[in-house]
Image (tube, rainbow, N blue to C red):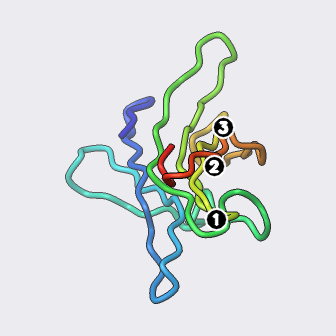
Amino acid sequence: LVEHDGVYYNFYNAKQMPEWIEQIGIATSQCLYDWERHCDNPIISVSKDGFDTQFCSDAKVFWDEDRKHWVMFFYGVGRGAAHMMIAFSRDLIHWERDTTPLYQAGGNLSGLD
């Protein structure tokens, strides 16, 4: 949940069943009681062949004062594992995702990273 210029932005996981695909949606409110889902949801959708082909979820968003843009860390699932992903925005609605994970899971024989 982020507040900017009197508007609250709630980033949520939108699940598509029965495939169990999760993508990131956004809803806005000015009072924290009435919410409106954005018409262009999902704002971060799964990719066709990247590290997030099944899930884009659990968004954490903050303002980067040095670079003057919003940063979103999110959880991506694809290519057989879970990965830490990142995206950037100037308006909290339109996001540009980096297709290379910040952290690429794998290598631990127990399956835990």
Q: Estimate how packed mark 1 is, as few (under 14), some (14 to 19) or many (20 or more) residues with alpha carbons within 10 Å.
A: few
Amino acid type for the residue under numbered disc 3: Ser
Residue at the (53%, 23%) spot, across then down = 63
| SS assignment at label 3 | strand
Q: Are marks 1 and 2 in contact (CB under 8 Å)?
A: yes
Residue at the (56%, 58%) spot, across then down = 56
Q: Earlier in the sequence, mark 1 or mark 2?
A: 1
Q: Position of residue 99 (x, y in %)?
A: 77, 48
Q: Which residue is mark 2?
A: 106
Q: Residue furthest front?
A: 109
Q: CA distance from mark 1 to mark 3?
A: 28 Å
The label on residue 43 is none
Q: Quadrant of the N terminus?
A: top left
Residue at the (25%, 57%) spot, across then down = 34
Q: State left or right for residue 14 relative to residue 108.
A: left
Amino acid type for the residue under numbered disc 1: Gly
Residue 97 sits above or below residue 4 on the image: below
Q: Position of residue 9 (x, y in %)?
A: 41, 44
Residue 109 sits above or below residue 40 on the image: above
Q: Earlier in the sequence, mark 2 or mark 3?
A: 3
Q: Position of residue 109 (x, y in %)?
A: 56, 51
Q: Earlier in the sequence, mark 1 or mark 3?
A: 1
| SS assignment at label 2 | loop
Q: Position of residue 21 (x, y in %)?
A: 53, 74
Q: Which residue is mark 3?
A: 89
Amino acid type for the residue under numbered disc 2: Gly
Q: Which residue is mark 1?
A: 80
Residue 31 sits above or below residue 80 on the image: above
Q: CA distance from mark 1 to mark 2?
A: 9 Å
How many marks can you see? 3
